[in-house]
Image (cartoon, rainbow, N blue to C red):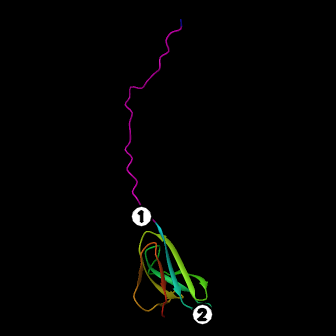
Amino acid sequence: MAPPQWVATSAAPVKTATVPAETKKPAEKLTIVEAKIDVGLGNTLYLRGQGGGLSWNTGVPLTCIDSKTWRWTTRSPEKLTFKLLLNDSIWAQGKDIVVSPGKRVEVVPVF
């Protein structure tokens, strides 16, 4: 008769780690800024502001969609506060524009 087989078990307690719940990030929503203006051949519209990667110090160019439409988009959970500039040097008249995340705003700037 064969001797009994023994299975070794660990007497050490099993350690469990408590993993903190993930911190929920606000959902990044597509925000669209569209400007309706013909700025003339060779000119470009820029945005400066706050939120969505914008800065008040350096402008980001909008994309020319057609002769009278310029567009800039971002995915961000933040509201945007911005102004448009012609060639990143001439500020549009009026107050700063504010848009909530996930919204589309159409602007007709005056320079």
Q: Residue furthest top?
A: 1
Q: Residue at x 42, y 61 (%)?
A: 25
For numbered disc 2, what is the local secondary structure? loop
State which tag comes first along the sequence, 2 or 1: 1
Q: Residue at x 59, y 83 (%)?
A: 64
Q: Decide: few, some or many residues near mark 1? Use Cα within 10 Å; few <14, some 14-19, many ≥20.
A: few
Amino acid type, label 1: Pro
Quick check: 7 above or below 109?
above
* Residue hosting label 2: 40
The magenta span reads: 2-27
Q: Position of residue 6 (x, y in %)?
A: 47, 17
Q: Position of residue 21 (x, y in %)?
A: 38, 51
Amino acid type, label 2: Gly
For numbered disc 1, what is the local secondary structure? loop
Q: Is residue 14 magenta?
A: yes
Quick check: 37 above or below 1?
below
* Residue hosting label 1: 26
Q: Quadrant of residue 68?
A: bottom right
